[in-house]
Amino acid sequence: YRLAEEGPADIRIGNVASDLGIVTGSGEVTFSLESGSDYLKIDNMTGELSTTERRIDREKLPQCQMIFDENECFLDFEVSVIGPSQSWVDLFEGRVIILDINDNTPTFPSPVLTLTVEENRPVGTLYLLPTATDRDFGRNGIERYELLQETSVFELQVADTLDGEKQPQLIVKGALDREQRDSYELSLRVRDGGDPARSSQAILRVLITDVNDNSPRFEKSVYEADLAENSSPGTPILQLRATDLDVGVNGQIEYVFGAATESVRRLLRLDETSGWLSVLHRIDREEVNQLRFTVMARDRGQPPKTDKATVVLNIRDENDNVPTIDIRKIGRIPLRDGVASVAEDVLVDTPIALVQVSDRDQGENGVVTCTVVGDVPFQLKPASEGEGELQNKRKYFLHTSAPLDYEAVHDYNVVIVAVDSGSPSLSSNNSLLVRVGDTNDNPPVFSQAVLEVSFPENNLPGERVATVVATDADSGKNAEITYSLEASPLSSEAPGSIFSIDPDSGDVSVQAVLDREQRDTYEFQVTARDKGVPSLQGSTTVVVRVADRNDNEPRFMQDVFTFYVKENLQPNSPVGMVTVMDFDKGRNAELSLSIQPGDHNQAAGIFSIENDTGTIFSTVSFDREQQTSYTFKVKAVDGGEPPRSATATVSLFVMDENDNAPTVTFPSNSSYTVLPPSSNMRTVVATVVATDADTGLNADLNYSIVGGNPFKLFEIDPASGVVSLVGKLAPKHYGLHRLVVQVNDSGQPPQSTTALLHVFVNESLSNATVVESQVARSLHTPLAQDIAGDPSYELSKQRLSIVIGVVAGIMTVILLILVVVMARYCRSKGKHGYEAGKKDHEDFFTPQQHDKAKKPKKDKKGKKGKQPLYSSIVTVEASKPNGQRYDSVNEKLSDSPGMGRYRSVNGGPGSPDLARHYKSSSPLPTVQLHPQSPTAGKKHQAVQDLPPANTFVGAGDNIS
């Protein structure tokens, strides 16, 4: 059939029935359009073929691209002729040739065409002009070209080429003088032969150049080559060669595309210098099987000369397309969404579907064989035996090859495989689901083999638990179902005492109150029976899981939890763990723990609890000396609605750590004790009293003397701190003794405190100010330096020995002079003594070197001065001039008045004068000592091992 493009809908094309010689009208023979329905339709009864509402555009049909033969553009269609009750089916193929109409306007490649013409060209010289293109062809194609204005220099001529195309040529008909005029601008119009005709125009710009009298010439006018499809970009195809007899610029040739379509320029690359034609983009033969175009060789003369050659490029097929399988309906058997419904009582060898297999490749690559895979009761048979059938496009009927049985197989997945003959071969597959129709032979079926139901505990008797539903593929009485309860195969317990079922609706009800804590799962079987004869049945297992309600409160493992922790524990450390449980389940058993303050709000802000583990943490560091125990409550609240709660008591006892050093309460570092020289051994000098804030072994104290006891005169009881005299006192022991006492506790590691005990050995205490100044100096003397007794005692003995020796040496020479000298010496010493304010040359604590062999000097009567013994010990606190206690830091002792001779209360002239050994005219510097901040210099560091409680600030004073 023939049909013009762009026609309206419902245009009659022809009558298939009359053309095939088939008599219609009885209704026994019907027609069905199996393909081509996008643009065509057929009357099922009359066989009248007509167009659909979809417009046919010949230039846009994929199969008509690059087709220039009027009879080569067509639409294929298939018509099946169906006999009564589809007892026979014949398939016929048809073709509608699409006729071109003039619906495209010819156009030039550019709105401005440039032509270079050399001057002095003879009249009659021809110049080829760019051709226009028209998507139409034949009489609707390009018919003529024309210049729109008259000119005395140029004339247009149109020549017919061997290809049947119109070639516009510009002819020189007058003299050209570039010096007079170097360009011309003409209007060129192209018109097609349609009715009505279509036309367009372009500006033809003629540039006059110098003479170039030789044109390039190709080696041959037609170049033909084969190219394998899918060749990679850059693959060389062929080389076009042209020669030019000119030399220099006029002989230099460049190659450009001439009359070439857009697809040619997109797919191919032409090297304008070498003439090599290569692949620019991969070419698919199934889209373009041949490329035909012209190439122009143009020299560089002014004006340039050109030559044209035709290139025919045949695209060689490669096996790059897999076969395609299209499965369509045939006759009255429905096929939708890949599913064909076939009754199980259909006859053997009945066609149920049409299978079309095609391959876009050519030759052996497009020869396709087709088969059904698997053990299924279906086979393929050719739809036609015509010799004109294409090898790469074949059609088959899918027939039944054996009886169908719905009870054996409900559905068949028919897989069809197509394999081409390429090397290597390619294959594809498609499937059709054949659904077999049913008869009345199906039992009831439940959607689930096991139905699990959640049902809350503490229910009311008679509540519905679940509804079970079974389906039956049959119809009528055979599909009517009744339900009953039976014991589960895994349980011998009859469900009737607890559960019941409605035989018609399948509603399962509970007859008793369920308690999840007693039993959480019930299992029984529901049987569904149809009313067919014989009756068929199916069953399902019902599992009832009892859901929890919040009917149990949390329970602690103990009512009272007792924990022991050490003091000084790091903050945020665990101190204990409580255990709590809930017999409920899920959210009802999710517990939230919190700390409840105890008496006097003890635990507020001090303790926290971890919800997951029940671990209790402290937010502070414990100090047993501040608080020894804590009592609070822990509360557990579950997540039920309403929530339930419980509480437990926590008692926390703080265990002692040795974190306190002993504190000396007596004596103070600035006090002193007077000890008479006549004191007996084991006389108690003083008792050091200390306390410790810890308990147990950490507060078990022991005492020791660690310094200031070079003569081993004193010892201290380690347990009681009683200091006793254990050595005999001699004159050299007179004066101030500074004992360094250390108090240690028994903790691990032990802690200690150092204190000073000052003992002043003398008969009396007539001038307390001097002793107080000595104690003040002692506080500024390093502990490593001993302060014990009279530092000038040895020096006095040495001086006495020298005097006695001198006297003995000169007695025999001048006895009288000796008597006079001795008398004056004795008189002078007895009168003046050592005056207050007289400066000694030695430092206060610098020991004097005396002759230890020299005995003390006797009085004139040869009698020793008797020293009274004191049976009591006097402890004197350093005092201020006004009698107040001297205990304020940074205070200076007041300057004492001039001292006379220091005598004992009841002693005679032989009593030692200790005052003269400690007087000094140079004031001591003031030394500031602060807690935990020792002075820089070791020489004047007074107390270097004392704890802060016994660290003091002392000041030196002037003694005159």
Image: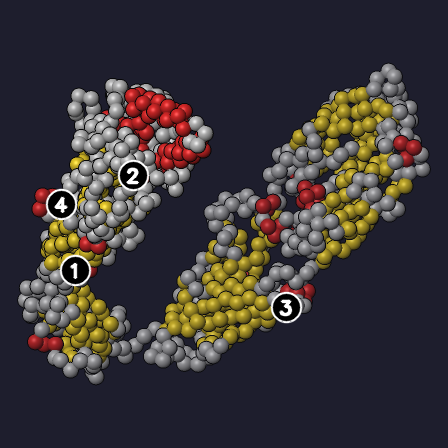
Give amino acid for label 1: Val
Of the two numbered discs 4 and 2 on the same chain, state the one appearing first in sequence. Answer: 4
Specify whether residue 861 is in view.
yes
The nearer-to-camera label among 1 and 3 is 1
Compute the Cα span from label 2 to label 1. Answer: 80 Å
Camera-nearest label, 1 or 4:
4
Instruction: Residue 621: tell me if it is visible.
Output: no
Give the mark nearest the N terminus, 2 or 1: 1
Q: Can you give x and y, in whole percent of width and height, for residue 626 in the image?
A: 17, 44
**Type of the residue with mark 3:** Ser
Q: Is residue 135 above or below residue 36?
A: above
Dot 4 lies on which element? loop
Seen in the picture, residue 417 relative to 784 is either above or below; the reply is below
Query: Element type at marker 2?
Result: helix
Between marks 2 and 3, how big is the CA–CA gap? 132 Å
Q: Nearer the viewer, mark 3 or mark 4?
A: 4
Q: Which residue is tagged 1?
A: 580
Q: Which residue is mark 4?
A: 602
Q: Return the x and y of residue 87 as percentages of the image width and height.
A: 44, 74
Question: Which-is-in-front pick, marks 4 and 2?
Answer: 2
Disc 3 target residue = 425
Q: Which mark is residue 731?
A: 2
Amino acid type assigned to the residue bearing label 4 in the image: Gln
Residue at far top of view: 180
Residue mark closest to the camera, 2 vs 1 = 2
Q: Pointer 2: residues within 10 angstroms few (<14), some, or many (20+)?
A: some
Q: Residue at x 64, y 52 (%)?
A: 287
Rendering coords of residue 368 (x, y %)? 61, 68
Cα distance between the residues tagged 1 and 4 = 23 Å
